[in-house]
Image (cartoon, rainbow, N blue to C red):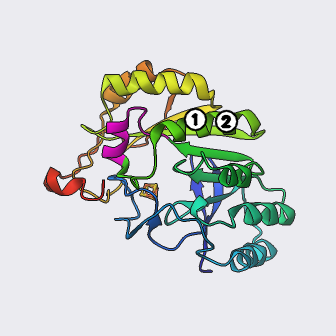
Amino acid sequence: MKYIYGPVRSRRLGFSLGITTIPRKVCSFDCVYCEVGRTTTLTTERREYIQREEIVTEVEEFLAKYKGPLDHITFSGLGEPTLNSEIGYMISEVKKLTSVPVAVLSNGSLISRDDVKHDLLNADIVKFTLNAALSAEYGNINQNNPSIELDAVIQGIIEFRKEFRGELWIEILLVRGLNDSESNYIALRKALNLIRPDKVHLNTVVRAPAFKIAGPLSIQELRKAKMLIGNGAEIISTKPGISVRHNMAPSTLFANS
Ligand code: SF4
């Protein structure tokens, strides 16, 4: 199988079969904490990076043979899944094959576009990562393609929420010194009040990040963030406070921002 992996056991999604719609590592972000590594193609261009039929055929073949537990089929993978212009078709076809709920894990960068919004409406769970509600902190941690504007992302999520009938989750990943200011927490609280997600997950760096400067928050710091962000936020990080070596110069950190 080239484009599907697992099922892996996930705390939030149970036994989850992963699907990547994007080759490593095409993304609209180059997040400092990314577990996949540095982004090699920083783009917002939507196209059929991987042929839709190849992915749907793999899922069909897997489902025909697999007899174990399966709680979700999850579009995530090696880059931003909504960059594949055929993700809407893939979600619909997978849902024809099985009653297992379909989840999409996205960085939310393209959700202000009508085509992306439309493509995700058929999913059962959509989780957007929203690490900051202040532009400087958003750019520092995500190192996004310059064409992405935070206000448009937040407004896009608000509009999506109005139409989407599934569960909308927001994940906030906190990195020491980059998006852990009280002012960011207050701004996130205001944005979440407007978005009205079903769940808010707080996370921090727990695996080797793309940039070694990306350090985790302690459990005490996560608790403070939870209190200030509100909106029912839950801490989902399993190993907060692990130490990560800080040996990369800050000047190299924001090379693509
Ligand atoms: S959006 Fe996801 S895949 Fe892209 S750089 Fe960030 S963590 Fe990595």
Write down the residue under mark 2. Answer: 159
Assess whether residue 136 is covered by the magenta stretch.
Answer: yes
Q: Looking at the image, is 164 positioned above or below residue 207? A: above
Depicted 140 relative to depicted 235: above or below: below
* Residue 100 in view in this figure: yes
Res. 234 mark: none
- Residue at x 67% of width, y 36% of height: 159
**Left or right of residue 181: residue 160:** right
Is residue 236 or residue 179 the one in the foreground?
A: 179
Q: Quadrant of residue 208?
A: bottom left
Instruction: Say if 222 sits above or below 208 in the image.
Output: above
| Cβ of mark 1 under 8 A from ligand 1 | no
**Amino acid found under the numbered disc labelled 2:** Glu
Residue 205 appears in the figure = no
Q: Amino acid at mark 1?
A: Gln
| Percent x, y of residue 63 | 78, 71
Where, by quadrant of the figure, is residue 76 drawn?
A: bottom right
Residue displayed at 74% across by 78% down: 53
Look at mark 1 in the image and give the residue it sits on. Answer: 155
Image quarter for ligand 1 equals bottom left
- For image coordinates 37% across by 28% down, the residue present is 184
Q: Secondary structure at mark 2?
A: helix
State the image coordinates of residue 188 (x, y, percent, origin top left).
46, 27
Q: Is mark 2 within 8 Å of ligand 1?
A: no
Contact between marks 2 and 1 (CB within 8 A): the answer is yes
Does 69 appear in magenta?
Answer: no
The boundaries of the magenta stretch are: 130-141
Crowding at mark 1 (Cα within 10 Å: few <14, some 14-19, many 20+): some
Answer with left or right where residue 23 lies relative to residue 19. left
- Quadrant for the N terminus, please: bottom right
